[in-house]
Every structure is written in C-alpha cells, then in structure tokens.
Image (cartoon, grey):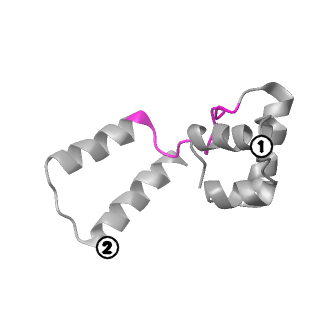
Amino acid sequence: MELSLKKRYEIVFLCEYPADPRFSFGQIAKVVHCCKSTAIFGVKKYHENRDLSTAERLGQPRITTTKQDKQITKMTEKEIILQPLKYKKIWKNMMLRLV
C-alpha cells in the first residue's frame, strides 16, 4: 500500500530536521508505521529530486473498447439480472469478437 504524501514528507522531516532528537530509519519507521526500507527509499528519493509526489502510472492497457463499455453500462442501468453461466457465455462471445 502506498504511503500518503503527508507521511512521505513526515519521514523526510524526521530524518532531516537539524534539532535533536535525531531519528534513525528504524525509529522513523516505527513512528510513521512503515518499513525501514520505505523510510530509506523516501529519504533517498527526496535527496535525488526534492519531489515526493507520486508519478502517474501507466497501468495495464484496457481490454474492452468504449463501445463495449457503453454496452456494459446499459446492461447494468437496465438492471438485467443474468445467471452467472449466461453472463460468462455473453462475456466470452464479446471477447471472441475482439479477436
């Protein structure tokens, strides 16, 4: 699970703040409730580019087309209740049309 931006900056603050007490990575991990390696990675990333925001992820490519998405939406809006096997068969037919 990804840490919030607030927690990432908290890790950096606890490590970089010049006043005492100085926290070790293990102590920071206990305070913020994360792994020691996460604390180390966060501080390392901060030193590299001073930015801790999450980069946009590309993710997995879409399987369905926009047309299929609209069909699925229409089916759910009409509250069509299908038996699981019927639904599986319909879905399989839709996927075969893609190939």
Q: CA distance from mark 1 to mark 2?
A: 65 Å
Kind of residue sitting beneath label 1: Asp
Q: Is residue 78 above or below residue 82?
A: above
Image point 43% across, 61% down: which residue? 92
Residue receiving disc 1? 20
57 inside magenta stretch: yes
Check disc 1 and report its element: helix, strand or loop. loop
**What span is in magenta?**
52-66
Kind of residue sitting beneath label 2: Leu
- Whether residue 61 appears in this view of the structure is no
CB under 8 Å between callouts 1 and 2? no
Residue 28 position by quadrant: bottom right
- Whether residue 40 appears in this view of the structure is yes
Mark 1 closeness class: few <14, some 14–19, many ≥20 residues within 10 Å: few
Residue 52 position by quadrant: top right
- The foreground one among 54 and 27 is 27
Image point 66% across, 37% down: which residue? 9
Mark with earlier residue (1, 2): 1
Q: Residue furthest front?
A: 20
Q: Determine which of the numbered discs, if any, sits on residue 65 in the image.
A: none
Q: Position of residue 12 (x, y in %)?
A: 73, 39
Between disc 1 and disc 2, the foreground one is: 1
Residue receiving disc 2? 85
Quarter of the picture containing the N terminus is bottom right
Q: Position of residue 16 (x, y in %)?
A: 79, 37
